[in-house]
Amino acid sequence: MQKIDDLRDANLSGADLSGANLSGANLSGANLSGADLSDANLRGANLSGADLSGADLSDANLSGADLSGADLSGADLSGADLSGADLSGANLSGANLSVADLSGANLSGADLSGADLSDADLRDANLSDANLSGADLSGADLSGADLSGANLSGADLSGANLSGANLSGAIGIGEQSEYAVGLVKQIAEIVLADNSKLQMDKVHVCETTHCLAGWVCTLDQTAKTLEPIFGWNAAACLAVPIPAFTDLFFADNATAIAFLQKVQSGAIDLSRRTIAHKLDAGEQ
């Protein structure tokens, strides 16, 4: 197929460009909304500011492409090669990026809210200040990724690899919310029904007996994912950033049970107070 180089500001909405060779092409500002670019070769292409909303880019080669500021909302990028691509400031809300290769990609400031990034390769990717609220990151490889300042509220990190990731300033992991408060209440219900299920001198005794932090890491999927990387204390603090609760992680059984009794009776205030928790791999 003949290679097309200059398509700046072109209107290609709904066009069938599947399998097209557009490597190195200039598509900046182009309208490609709803276009079929599946299996297309867009390696090193300039798509900055382009409208790719709802486009089919499944299995496309976008390695090293410039997609800065592009609108990719609702686009299908499943299985696409976006390694080393510039997606800074791009709108990827609701996009399908499952199994995509985003290793080394620049996604700083990108909107990935509600996006499907399950099993995606995000090794060494720059996700600083990105909006990942409600995103599906289950099974994703985020090793060495920069997630500083990223919004991860409601994101699914189950089975994700976060080894060496930078989560400094990240918000929303266990955001103080009805969920975080509800988790503490769930722990209170479990422990107060059977005090033997709490043992404060050990993180995990068995599948049904833990300390307070151990219970968080057992019941919360994100904390469970983070525990082997950052340690039980940091993982539980991120999942439930409630000082009245986390301050008791090194308390004895009697003190912890007394606290849980107050939680269950409603006598204690679990209102939010943000904690700053800089995390580097290996911090306990």
Image (tube, rainbow, N blue to C red):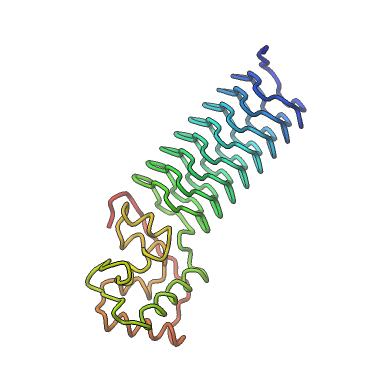
Q: Residue furthest front?
A: 207
Q: Quadrant of residue 3?
A: top right
Q: Is residue 240 above or below residue 78?
A: below
User: What residue is at 28 percent from the left and 51 percent from the top?
Assistant: 282
- The image quarter containing residue 212 is bottom left
| Left or right, 219 with reference to 8 | left
Left or right: 6 with respect to 128? Answer: right
Residue at 66% across / 16% down in the picture? 5
Single out the residue that lies furthest toward the top. 2
Q: Position of residue 78 (x, y in %)?
A: 57, 37
Q: Quadrant of residue 125?
A: top left
Q: How many marks?
A: 0
Q: Looking at the image, which residue is at 27% across and 84% down?
A: 254
Report x, y in % for residue 19: 64, 22
- Asked whether, in this view, residue 204 is left or right of residue 159, the answer is left
Furthest residue toward left? 201
In the image, residue 113 above or below residue 217: above
* Along the line of sight, the residue nearer the viewer: 263 or 241: 263
